[in-house]
Amino acid sequence: MGINYFESLNGDIRVSFKLDTKNTSYCIGIVYEEGYIGHLYYGSKIKDGDLSGLIRINEYPFGKVGFERERCSFHDFFAHEYPTHGIGDYREDCFGVETKGGNSEVLLSYDHYEIIKGKPGITGMPSSFGSDDEVTTLIIHCTDRFLNLKVDLYYSVFYDNDVITRSVKVINSSDEHLFIKKIYSTCLDMDNKDFDAITLHGSWARERHMESVPVTHNKLIVESVRGESSHQDNPFLALITPNTTEDTGEVYAMNFVYSGNFKAGVQLDQFDHIRMFMGISPEDFKWKLEPGDRFESPEVVMTYSDSGLGRMTHAFHDFYREHLIRSPYLHKKRPILINNWEATYFDFDTDKLISIAKEASKLGIEMLVMDDGWFGKRNDDSNSLGDWVVNEEKIKGGLKYLVDEVNKLGMKFGIWFEPEMISPDSDLMREHPDWAIHIKGREGIRSRNQFVLDYSRKDVRDEIYKKVSAILKSANIEYVKWDMNRQLTDLGSSALEPERMGELLHRYVLGVYELQERLTKEFPDLLLENCSGGGGRFDPGMFYYSPQIWCSDDTDAVERLSIQEGTALVYPLSTMGAHVSDCPNHAVGRTTPFETRGHVALAGTFGYELDVTRIPKEDVDMIPDQVKMYHRYNDLVREGDYYRIASYGKNHEFDCYGVVSKDKKEALYTFVQVLGRVNHKTRRIYLRGLDPEKTYRIDEDKCYTGDILMKVGYLIPDIKGDFRSILIHLEEKDG
Ligand code: GLA
């Protein structure tokens, strides 16, 4: 299901493939005797039929007629499925090498194809999965006969999800080594439709803000060269046609299942054709391939929508929930946690933590998370990373005692680690000065007083794993927050030969994946939350290991509106770590109502990040109701369809979004009035996602049909003041 193969139709096309999902088609044509792999179509679903006359092949400017072997201008014009370096396609290419002789060119020809049920995994890396009924894979085997290099293009078609994933495998079948200098995972060559590009840009404490810019003849690049996917640029890129809304317009979107350096971009070429691409960033990348070796690229998830951004969002959310996140917690309510970071920072001990747990347990909070500062001699951020030994001066009585006491209160216990890091002032550094990523002889560049461990080394990974797992086995620990608080510099490894130094960054990411795989295999019931200085590594690669990621160190309810909106453009609400914190907010200094903070955190995993023994009594008194609210609505938030209604980022006054259950019997909308206006006593909100035929009950007493609520709208009651919010809950009447 999903993939058709057609042989020698007519003209210059030798073979073509048609990949169908429920609402989309993707067509590939193999042309000329050389077997170039061309792109024919991606868009709304089309019928099976002969497309051979439609491939972009004969009209290239410098004339086919009389120049039968004219290939240079052909390559610069042709819609390539996987453009390679050095052949006369001067647009951004996807693949280049360095041979023993110092050459960089690759010219691929089609060799044969396979269509298989299901989807093969990618060695050592996260990748989406599905049963044989859910996904079919096309492998186009290509070769560069001159180099004896095999390049396999993988297309996995998830029919029901309107998703096609793409990745590449390269095998060196020659008897000489070569280096891969650049390897992207996907490329989309299309005609331009006046596209704008949407990206998710940000910074620390301001992650994933949506930006939209017109595509021009200047190359538009979204890239991380920081060693992680980053706060600054998320590995997501979408093209939209003019005036695209939530329900109308065309969207082509790509998202990278990878947590390291990436590069994505779009280029409008001299003929006004579009090329969109995504893969590992070639910056600081060079991979040696010995004879017989193979290299597998990470995968890109692609989706197309002809009904606006809403459908794109739903396609990504459903796809990640159904085909990428493996955690047993995926479909479960996560325990409501209280984290002591903003409550105490480094200044805590057993008594302090137990006092927080005591109070929290009375209010219905279900788990205490002990954050940074419990190990080595760490009382600030200047030391001890790597020394994963409990500091019994703070954790008096030991970790097991603390965990047991917390458990006795009926609460679970969770703990913070930063396993990829090493402090210069640590026993680990004194013992193994060469374990940090560093350049021999050069003084390393510190960030937050720390260096990054060389995870390309197995001995380093094994030692850290041993220490982390020993702590996890020493007490009843049910949750881990895996943090990563600095980006990479001083790119050198004492274990890699000079000609393999360009492998460090990718090997580092593979090392992180290996450890998270080991952790989740050995502790299958552990709830793992990824984190990187807030949301610096919020990418689909991490979903394979953890069902949730801390969204941002900015917990201010207003800032979170834009951060969570941008995050939820692509990633399910169930993955967004969101907590209620104390005010004035530690990041921005703003004071917002406790109620609003609760409503905003409800859109994510929900929890607290404050000292419950010290906040105002009226805030404490609200917690039991917030706990009830979470238990009442989390199934809906976690599993439902998310709808954007109004964006504070755009209108600078209010925000509104909703979640509707899959059966459309229940919905919850959140309205946040950031700026109260006298002349806007009431606002009319056009609800979205409801069944127009169903009648819904709102607030116990009022009933309206779905079509009325979506077309005529709903009047938000007068909620005077700034930063005020309300929840609007709907249930099908008699449903
Ligand atoms: C990062 C995290 C925070 C906290 C600190 C601890 O900034 O995002 O939540 O864990 O590290 O150092």
Image: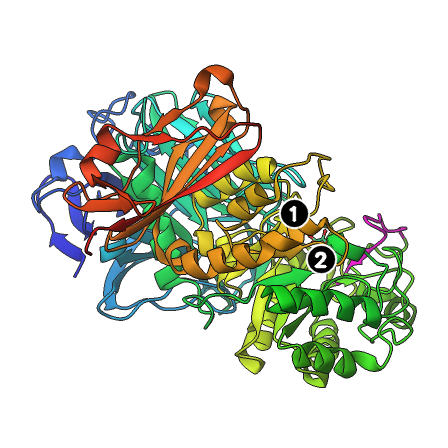
Mark 1 residue crowding within 10 angstroms, few (<14) / some (14–19) / many (20+)? some
Q: Is 154 placed above or below 516 here?
A: above
Residue 171, horizontal then vertical, whole percent: 45, 63
Question: Which image quarter is the N terminus in?
Answer: bottom left
Q: Say which quarter of the image contains residue 586.
A: top right
- Residue, disc 2: 612
Q: Residue at x 78, y 83 (%)?
A: 401
Between circles 1 and 2, the one closer to the viewer is 2
Residue occupying image coordinates x 84% and y 74%: 395
- Label 2 crowding class (10 Å Cα cut-off): few <14, some 14-19, many 20+? many
Amino acid identity at mark 2: Val
**Quadrant in the picture for the C terminus:** bottom left
* Magenta-tinted stretch: 442-453
Residue 626 picture location, percent across and down: 53, 54
**Label 1 beta carbon less than 8 Å to ligand 1:** no
Q: Residue at x 16, y 40 (%)?
A: 12
For residue 83, say whether it is visible.
Answer: no
Determine the secondary structure under disc 1. Answer: loop
Report the residue marked by disc 1: 284
Q: Residue 682 in the image: x percent, y percent?
A: 40, 24
| 316 lies left or right of 603 | left
Q: Residue 213, image x and y in percent?
A: 46, 24
**Figure check: 27 above or below 719:** below
Most distant residue in the front direction: 701
Q: How many marks?
A: 2
